[in-house]
Amino acid sequence: FGSLAVPVVGVVSAWFQLGELPTLAEGAGMGMIVVALAVLAARELLAAQRFVTHRSAGKPAPSGVGTL
């Protein structure tokens, strides 16, 4: 997750500290990165929720849970 956020942090930092305005292409790229981070986070949260639900019911974890 952290490596995907590095470009976003860099562009936002340059915007605030140096007054550099991001271009439309940079803004679109940052938007895609943020969406990708949200998808990955949601995927992991759902996998963890399924794992807890199956474990509390005494069932084995479904295959592929928690793996990318």
Image: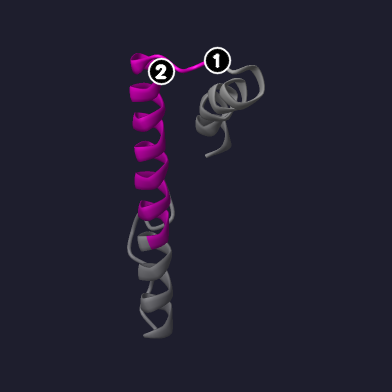
Q: Which image quadrant is residue 60 in?
A: bottom left
Provide the residue designation for mark 1: 20
- The magenta span reads 20-45
Q: Is residue 42 magenta?
A: yes
What element does badge 2 sit on?
helix
What element does badge 1 sit on?
loop
> Which residue appears at 34% of the width and 15% of the height?
25
Give the main secondary structure, helix, strand or loop, of the magenta stretch: helix
Counting from the top left corner in percent of width and height, residue 9 is at: 57, 30
Q: Is residue 41 magenta?
A: yes
Neighbourhood count class around disc 1 (C-alpha, 10 Å): few under 14, some 14–19, many 20 upward: few
Please tell me whether residue 51 is drawn above or below residue 24 in the rendered image.
Answer: below
Counting from the top left corner in percent of width and height, residue 52 is at: 43, 74
Of 42 and 19, nearer the camera is: 19
Task: Please identify the residue farthest to the front as the structure is shown.
Answer: 19
> Which residue appears at 59% of the width and 23% of the height?
10
Q: Amino acid at mark 1?
A: Glu
> Which residue appears at 61% of the width and 27% of the height?
16
Please tell me whether residue 22 is drawn above or below residue 54 in the rendered image.
Answer: above
Of 20 and 11, nearer the camera is: 20
Q: Which image quarter holds the C terminus?
A: top left
Neighbourhood count class around disc 2 (C-alpha, 10 Å): few under 14, some 14–19, many 20 upward: some
Q: Which image quadrant is residue 37 in?
A: top left
Provide the residue designation for mark 2: 26
- Looking at the image, residue 60 sits to the left or right of residue 18; the answer is left
Of 24 and 57, nearer the camera is: 24
- Looking at the image, residue 48 sits to the left or right of residue 6; the answer is left
Q: Which image quadrant is residue 66 in?
A: bottom left
